[in-house]
Image (cartoon, helix red, strand yellow):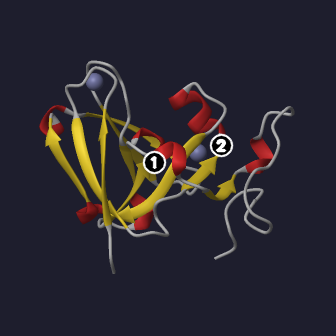
Amino acid sequence: MATTTYKGHCDCGQTEWEVKLTADQASHVLCHCDDCKRVSTGAYTLNQIIPKSALTFTKGGDALKVYTYKALSGNPTHCYYCPNCTTHPYHHQTVLGPDTIVLRTGLLDGAKDFPVAAEIFCKDMYKWESKVAPAGASFDITPPS
Ligand SMILES: [Zn+2]
Ligand SMILES: [Zn+2]
């Protein structure tokens, strides 16, 4: 499938990466869960599930630190972040298997042009937020599997 390469960098610039996304993947999945609120200190995070092989660190990848928390599934989630500025380019939900990661799409050059594909954990939204995903793509927790 055809992919486009997008670049991202952390706030301090010591970490840089490139990711190959299909047209469908060049979109944001908003996560309103409470873990995301605490890790990001924002109202929600911007994400996409991608193959691990699509992401390449061009600078500082070996220096990333890992923060691990226990996800709702009971499985560990490993968050990879720049040790200097704490920007968090991706995380690995171990429940997804070893070859799949969750990319923080909001950090990519061009991300302001990405549409919203879906939003999850709407049950944890702040009261003042409105749902912004296309009809049928806002979920209280996650899409039924
Ligand atoms: Zn940094
Ligand atoms: Zn979340």
Coordinates of residue 77 in the picture (x, y in percent): 43, 48
Q: Tell me how far mark 1 sits from mark 2, CA to CA.
A: 16 Å
Which class describes the residues within 10 Å of circle 1: few (<14), some (14-19), or many (20+)? many
The quadrant of the rendering that contains the N terminus is bottom left
Residue at mark 2: C-beta within 8 A of ligand 2: yes
Up the image or down, 2 lies above or below 18; here it is below
Q: Quadrant of the C terminus?
A: bottom right
Q: Secondary structure at mark 2?
A: loop
Residue at the image point whose x is 22% and y is 32% from the top: 15
Q: Amino acid at mark 1?
A: Thr
Task: Please tell me which residue lies in front, 131 or 1.
Answer: 1
Image x and y of residue 80, in percent:
32, 39
Specify which label sits upstream in the sequence, 1 or 2. 2
Q: Quadrant of ligand 2?
A: top right
Q: Nearer the viewer, residue 106 or 39?
A: 106
Say whether mark 1 is within 8 Å of ligand 2: no
Q: Are marks 1 and 2 in contact (CB under 8 Å)?
A: no
Q: Is residue 18 left or right of residue 1?
A: left
Q: Vertical placement of 33 versus 139: above or below? A: above
The residue labelled by disc 2 is 33
Question: Dot 2, crowdedness within 10 Å: few (<14), some or many (≥20)?
Answer: some
Q: In which quadrant of the rendered view does residue 50 lie? A: bottom left
Picture mark count: 2
Q: Which residue is mark 1?
A: 105
Q: Secondary structure at mark 1?
A: helix
Q: Position of residue 9 (x, y in %)?
A: 29, 34
**Kind of residue at disc 2:** Cys
> In this orientation, which residue lies closer to the viewer: 131 or 64?
131
Residue 13's quadrant in the figure?
top left
Q: Is 26 placed left or right of 73 in the picture?
A: left
